[in-house]
Amino acid sequence: MAASLAWLLVAIVLASLYLAMHHRVAAARRRGLPLGPTPLPLVGNLLSVSRSGPHRSLARLAERYCPLMRVRLGVVDYVVASSPAVAWRAQRRLATEEVMSPRRLDALAPTRREKVRELVRCVAGRAARGEPVEVGLEAFEAFLGILSCTAFSADLVDPDLRDAGGREAGEPRKDDMLDVALDNEDEWKNNNPVIDRNNIKGLIADLFVAGTDSGSTAIEWAIVELLQNPQSMQKVKDEFRRVLGTRTEIEESDISQLPYLQAVLKETLRLHPSWKCKAILFPKAPTSYCIWAIHRKPDVWADPDRFMPERFMETDTNFFGKHPEFIPFGGGRRICLGLPLAYRMVHMVLASLLFHFDWKLPEGAEKDGVDMREKYGMVLHKETPLKALAIETYNRK
């Protein structure tokens, strides 16, 4: 009798959960959410999404259901876009034209130039000692130094310059991003009451998280791909010789004259989008795994899994969200706020590392091959960090 009662209670609970689940599905349809895999009670579609590679799992689900798909992770509904035709068009909430204007970025170019020189000196020191360079870590520290100096004139990497920012009352302007934001705070609040100091802090924090991690990851993947594609590496070197001649330093203004270098970065970000994944915080934001699916659609990209920078040489496809098949920084009104700065930083760091150094894998890695597995997190890192040997180009005999 007791056993029968227990089974009856279990049946009632399961039936209740089943009815509740279908009620939520019906409610989702009434709210206009797209269709997707049927969620299980409590866990939703979590069992269908691999923890190690959710971007791949969601891409497979999208092929089975539809490019614009609803999935439920636990009890929260998400909408995943995996087709250029349904890429997001959400509104931007912060106006940063002043902070990211070309005039402002040009004024801070000397700071970026010096930080890149410091990176080159650091890598040259390791090259002279025959030590392998952990490319992602060195690039991360370079981006952190560039962003901290750009944002508030303090270098978070160099302890001697760490306390140099934080303008005190009565001190002259430093003309960094924090200065601009605070000086325009009242005007912004009058025109848009949503903007306050919390938004300003959030903007700067977002730039740091996205700029350091995403930028360094892009550099690491680019060098990995070039190491595995020596013909592409040679084309980058040939372009440097053709455009820069006997010069011993590269400038930001040179980037526009280096189309193959730009194509290398585009192809790297097509294969390994390093967009900061905001799905956990902002369900309507584009995410790295939906961008990953868009960038590898075989009906859009020929041989989509192959690293082939040449595919970008005869097109006007760019980073600025005007081509829905290629949106490494998002697109439309939700395009990455820091794109103007990221564009300059990532190109300059990559160009400097390739211009000043030849790169090769350590003996063991060259024999066994490069581990190309992805580690899912805020961005798509390499599972195993790249350690490579640098040979300084202009110090060789």
Image: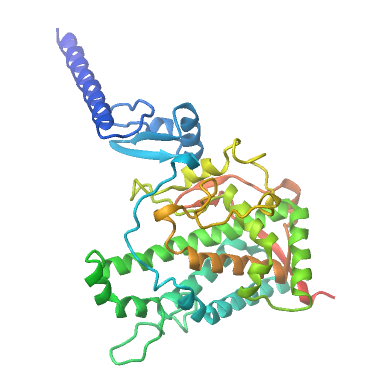
Residue lying farthest to the top in this orientation: 1
Viewer-proximal residue, 133 or 316?
316
- Relative height, residue 385 to residue 170 (above, below): above
Looking at the image, residue 32 sits to the left or right of residue 165; the answer is left
Would you say residue 196 is visible in this rendering?
no
Residue lying farthest to the right in this orientation: 397
Looking at the image, residue 261 sits to the left or right of residue 137; the answer is right
Looking at the picture, how far across and down is residue 322, in whole percent? Answer: 51, 53
Looking at the image, residue 384 sits to the left or right of residue 37; the answer is right
**Which quadrant: the C terminus?**
bottom right
Residue 247, quarter of the rendered image: bottom right
Number of residue marks: 0
- Residue displayed at 53% across by 61% down: 215
Would you say residue 370 is visible in this rendering?
yes
- Residue displayed at 42% across by 48% down: 286
Viewer-proximal residue, 305 or 136?
305
Looking at the picture, how far across and down is residue 287, in whole percent? Answer: 44, 47
- Relative height, residue 183 to residue 279 (above, below): below
- Relative height, residue 170 to residue 208 (above, below): below
- Residue displayed at 71% across by 66% down: 390
Looking at the picture, how far across and down is residue 161, in whole percent? Answer: 46, 83
